[in-house]
């Protein structure tokens, strides 16, 4: 009986080893494509927060010697210099990573726009920091059904509340003005990520 247990244990170990090797092999094959996909999402988010039109010039990296996650980008639009970088902070379930665009006007560095580029927050709760909202209501949808022309407009439900804010307006005391009720940890993380991004931009351009 003991010999049979040893035999079964040996077979189980072999099966486990084969499974581990299979998963590791699949990851090694896919990791480059995953990295490329993440890089593409990041580049697109940087262009969006800078307000760059599709097909326009690529933003330039100001601090090329820095690690990728700490690089600051600059672009000029209508004679105005705009800057962008990413910021990250721990949320409820993991890191909340934002791409943040900013402008310097009259001595104040303020947020142009922001995008969530990575988050693993609770679906239906923390994920609301990355959701869009629509202007359509039950009545406007009914009007559409009846043939009335109703133009749909969408905007970021949470991220739009960060626009125009400077570093001094992203302190813990200011979070109450922008957070989503019931999603305190996730919104705090997003606000702190935005503050870190602005701080990095300020350090690089000063």
Image (tube, rainbow, N blue to C red):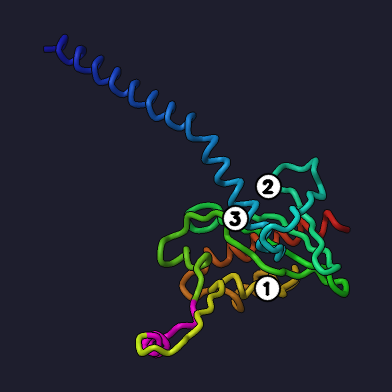
Q: Quadrant of residue 122?
A: bottom left
Residue projecting furthest to the front: 147
Magenta span: 134-144
Q: Main secondary structure of the magenta part?
A: helix
Write down the residue under mark 3: 97
The numbered mark, 1 or 3, whose residue comes first in the sequence reads 3
Question: Is residue 26 inside the magenta stretch?
Answer: no
Q: Quadrant of residue 56?
A: bottom right
The numbered mark, 2 or 3, whose residue comes first in the sequence reads 2
Give the quadrant of the N terminus.
Answer: top left
Q: Please tell me whether mark 2 sits on a helix, a strand or a loop.
A: helix
The numbered mark, 2 or 1, whose residue comes first in the sequence reads 2
Write down the residue under mark 1: 163
Residue projecting furthest to the top: 3
Q: CA distance from mark 1 to mark 3?
A: 17 Å
Q: CA distance from mark 2 to mark 1?
A: 22 Å
Write down the residue under mark 2: 69
What's the residue at 55%, 67% (across, down)?
A: 187
- Number of numbered tags placed on the structure image: 3
């Amino acid at each position: 009986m003991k010999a049979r247990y040893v035999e079964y244990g040996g077979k189980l170990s072999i099966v486990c080893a084969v499974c581990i090797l299979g998963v590791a092999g699949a990851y090694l094959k896919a990791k480059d494509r995953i990295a490329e996909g993440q890089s593409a999402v990041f580049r697109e988010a940087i262009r969006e927060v800078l307000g760059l039109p599709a097909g326009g010039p690529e933003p330039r990296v100001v601090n090329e010697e820095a690690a990728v996650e700490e690089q600051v980008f600059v672009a000029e639009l209508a004679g105005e210099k705009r800057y962008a970088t990413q910021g990250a902070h721990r949320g409820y379930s993991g890191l909340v990573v934002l791409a943040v665009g900013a402008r310097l006007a009259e001595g104040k560095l303020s947020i142009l726009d922001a995008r969530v580029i990575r988050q693993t927050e609770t679906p239906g709760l923390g994920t609301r920091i990355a959701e869009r909202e629509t202007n359509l209501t039950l009545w406007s949808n009914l009007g559409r059904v009846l043939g009335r022309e109703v133009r749909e407009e969408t905007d970021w439900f949470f991220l739009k509340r960060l626009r125009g804010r400077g570093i001094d307006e992203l302190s813990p005391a200011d979070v109450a003005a922008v957070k989503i009720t019931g999603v305190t940890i996730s919104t705090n993380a997003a606000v702190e990520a935005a503050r870190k991004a602005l701080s990095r931009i300020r350090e690089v351009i000063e």
